[in-house]
Image (cartoon, rainbow, N blue to C red):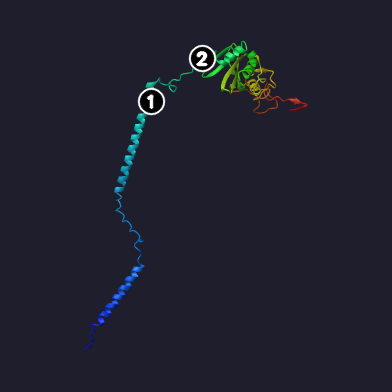
């Protein structure tokens, strides 16, 4: 039989005191390790229940459909506004000429009252044979015999200091003269430009304008080369695009379209009559 000694009443408080002390120590440690309330991190929001895959496409499709309808409505409104504006413009004034369907060519008009024409006619007697305006361009037909005097007057008295171009036109069947020698002159003060036309017969010689505009030198050489028009008192009237000895003038309308046999393609020792380059001899040596 085991002999158990019963605990005395004094032992119970001791045990309770130890348990209490241990509990307080544990609580103290917990308080020290815990974060202050002010520094506590906020609780993460619990995400709402995500939409199912079946619901998402349905909503995106619906939004896209609404946007397309808005764009379509805006386009319709813009088209209606444009049509209304066009109709109002047509009602307010005459319609524009139908250039695309039936072109309306500009009309020719007399220009005898133009200030430059009047000044030229008064400054040089018999200098204006005709004057007209077409598509905004002023053209004065002048006698070829007075071309230098007319050009000088227009430059010094009317301010046409710039010779834009000098060319020719071939009219092989015209009785009054086969060629038109054309001068384009320009005035910088008001950006005015006019055209002089001098009628020249096939064998007629016209005076050079190089004394008025130096740039006429190369232009007249080109006209001489391509049309065969001779300019008197030119400082060096020789071909500029073809070689000396070239047979014919390429921009004359009777020049063969297929060209002529000049022999230049095969470079033979002997060229046909009128064809090939001319060899000039200087100081006993071939150039």
Q: Earlier in the sequence, mark 2 or mark 1?
A: 1
Residue 62 point in image, percent of width and height: 30, 43
| Residue 15 seen anywhere in this rendered image of the structure | yes
Q: What secondary structure is found at the residue carrying circle 1?
A: helix
The residue positioned 32% from the left and 45% from the top of the image is 60
Quadrant of the snapshot with the C terminus: top right
Quadrant of the snapshot with the N terminus: bottom left
On the picture, is 271 further left or further right than 59? right
Q: Nearest the camera: 182 or 139? A: 139
> Hey, which quadrant is residue 236 in on the image?
top right
The residue positioned 31% from the left and 46% from the top of the image is 57
Residue 14 point in image, percent of width and height: 27, 80
Residue 263 point in image, percent of width and height: 66, 25
| Residue 255 seen anywhere in this rendered image of the structure | no
The residue positioned 36% from the left and 30% from the top of the image is 79
Q: Which residue bears the numbered disc 2?
A: 109
Crowding around mark 2 (Cα neighbors within 10 Å: few <14, some 14 to 19, many 20+) is: few
| Gap between marks 2 and 1 measured at Cα | 33 Å
Q: Which residue bears the numbered disc 1?
A: 86
């Amino acid at each position: 039989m085991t002999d158990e000694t019963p605990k005395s009443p004094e032992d119970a408080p001791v045990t309770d005191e130890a348990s209490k002390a241990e509990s307080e120590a544990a609580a103290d440690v917990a308080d020290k390790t815990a974060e202050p309330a002010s520094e506590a991190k906020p609780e993460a929001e619990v995400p709402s229940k995500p939409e199912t895959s079946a619901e998402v496409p349905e909503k995106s499709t619906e939004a896209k459909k609404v946007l397309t309808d808005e764009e379509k409505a805006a386009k319709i409104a813009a088209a209606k506004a444009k049509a209304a504006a066009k109709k109002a413009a047509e009602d307010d004034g005459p319609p524009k000429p139908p250039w695309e369907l039936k072109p309306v060519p500009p009309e020719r008009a007399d220009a005898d009252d133009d200030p430059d024409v009047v000044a030229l006619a008064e400054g040089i007697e018999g200098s204006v044979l005709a004057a007209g305006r077409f598509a905004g361009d002023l053209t004065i037909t002048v006698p070829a015999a007075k071309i230098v005097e007319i050009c000088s007057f227009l430059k010094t008295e009317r301010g046409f200091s710039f010779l834009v171009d000098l060319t020719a036109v071939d009219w092989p069947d015209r009785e009054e003269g086969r060629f038109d020698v054309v001068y384009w002159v320009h005035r910088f003060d008001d950006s005015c430009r006019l055209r002089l036309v001098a009628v020249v017969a096939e064998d007629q010689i016209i005076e050079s304008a190089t004394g008025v505009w130096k740039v006429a030198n190369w232009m007249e050489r080109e006209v001489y080369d391509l049309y065969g028009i001779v300019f008197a008192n030119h400082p060096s009237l020789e071909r500029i695009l073809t070689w000396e000895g070239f047979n014919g003038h390429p921009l004359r309308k009777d020049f063969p379209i297929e060209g002529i046999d000049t022999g230049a393609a095969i470079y033979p020792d002997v060229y046909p009559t009128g064809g090939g380059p001319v060899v000039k001899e200087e100081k006993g040596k071939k150039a």
